[in-house]
Image (cartoon, helix red, strand yellow):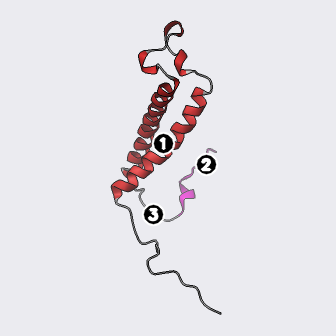
Amino acid sequence: MPVFRAPSDEYTGKLRWPRLGQDAAIVLWPSFLVASVATMACFAFIDPVLIGNDDYPPPAFATRMTGYAVGFFFFWLVASLSSLLTLYLVRTAHPEPPEADGNADDRVRSTE
């Protein structure tokens, strides 16, 4: 039987993204997905043309598509800030000190 082998130019899993590229993907992709869902949920109930005083649209929301775009980018900004804060907290976390005797249950005290 012939043995099938992968060509040598195929990806072998050794290529790594630069740190900035990883951080951008970690922040932007989940926030994009959250903004998409938030936009759908928000504009299922709110018509962007009717936002304003006495049912007159503000100039920024003259058309529905403009309102949807502004809403999407607002939600994307908020979700990106949330993801960026999470990334910052994970990257700057201090490592936990190792356990002295390896048994974490000894630290739990009885209330009796």
Q: Specify the quadrant that holds the C terminus.
A: top right
Find numbered disc 2 in the image and state the secondary structure of the residue it sits on: loop
**Whole-number angstrom distance, CA of label 1 to CA of label 3:** 40 Å
At label 3, counting other C-alpha atoms closer than 10 Å, the crowd grade (few under 14, some 14-19, many 20 or more) is few
Residue type pointed to by label 2 = Ser
> Is 43 left, or right, of 10 in this rendering?
right
Residue 20's mark? Answer: none
* Depicted 64 relative to depicted 3: above or below: above
Q: Name the residue tied to disc 1.
A: 31
**Whole-number angstrom distance, CA of label 1 to CA of label 2:** 44 Å
Residue 110's mark? Answer: 2
Circle nearer the viewer, 3 or 2 = 3
Residue type pointed to by label 1 = Ser
Which residue lies at the image location 46% right of the left edge and 61% below the top edge? 99
Circle nearer the viewer, 1 or 2 = 1
Find numbered disc 1 in the image and state the secondary structure of the residue it sits on: helix
Magenta span main SS:
loop
Q: Name the residue tied to disc 3.
A: 100
Residue 107 belongs to the span the image colors magenta = yes
At label 1, counting other C-alpha atoms closer than 10 Å, the crowd grade (few under 14, some 14-19, many 20 or more) is many
| Part of the protein shown in magenta | 103-112
Mark 3 / mark 2, whichever is N-terminal:
3
* Depicted 58 relative to depicted 6: above or below: above
Q: Are marks 3 and 2 in contact (CB under 8 Å)?
A: no
Q: Residue 81's x, y, as percent? A: 41, 38
